[in-house]
Amino acid sequence: QVHLLESGGGLVQAGGSLRLSCAASGSIFSVSAMGWYRQAPGKQRELVATITSGGNTNYADAVKGRFTISRDNAKDTVYLQMNSLKHEDTAVYYCNALIYPRDTDPVYNYWGQGTQVTVSS
């Protein structure tokens, strides 16, 4: 079994910062790309940022220049530093990871349980 455990969400005022963490645990051979997605009430889940195992990053236009994704490959952990937060960043943030549980397995797509980020205006 593989699990993604997120932490770091909460309530913050507009202009403030939060840092999300997501650690993968369990039966893991290797972790490929990791990322963060978010879902606001009444909206579809959308990509926030992704990072490959080699450190290449991709960001949604809405967060470029404000959010930074990073990872610690030794800890199978991905981070999302969120600065200059806006009310429209309010959403449930989900961690995502492409993981090979064993060297003989294909890659599987895993999701965390989600962490609430609320930005008050």
Image (spheres, rainbow, N blue to C red):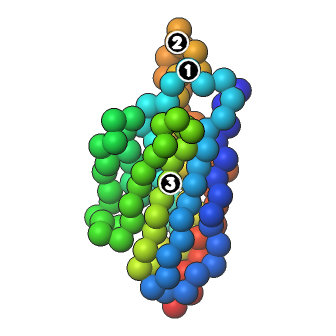
Residue at horizontal 57 percent and vertical 39 percent from the top: 75
Mark number for residue 63?
A: none
Q: How far, Cα to Cα, is label 3 from label 2? A: 25 Å
Give yes or no for contact between labels 2 and 1 (Cβ–Cβ under 8 Å).
Answer: yes
Q: Residue 67: tell me if it is visible.
A: yes
Tell me which numbered mark, 3 or 1, is placed earlier along the sequence. Answer: 1
Q: Is residue 119 left or right of residue 58?
A: right
- The location of residue 82, given as percent across then percent down, is 46, 69
- The location of residue 18, given as percent across then percent down, is 54, 71
Mark 2 secondary-structure assignment: loop
Q: Which residue position is annotated with label 1?
A: 29
Which residue is the extreme one toward the front?
74
Above or below, 28 relative to 82: above
Residue at horizontal 66 percent and vertical 23 percent from the top: 27
Specify the amino acid type for callout 2.
Asp
Mark number for residue 103?
A: 2
Which residue is the extreme one toward the bottom?
121
Tell me which numbered mark, 3 or 2, is placed earlier along the sequence. Answer: 3
Residue at horizontal 38 percent and vertical 61 percent from the top: 68
Mark 1 secondary-structure assignment: loop
Specify the amino acid type for callout 1.
Phe
Q: Which residue position is annotated with label 3?
A: 79
Give yes or no for contact between labels 3 and 2 (Cβ–Cβ under 8 Å).
Answer: no
- The location of residue 2, given as percent across then percent down, is 66, 31
Specify the amino acid type for callout 3.
Tyr
Pick the residue in front: 46 or 14: 14
Above or below, 35 relative to 87: above
Q: Is residue 27 left or right of residue 15?
A: right
Q: Mark 2, residues whose alpha carbon is within 10 Å: few (<14), some, or many (≥20)?
A: few
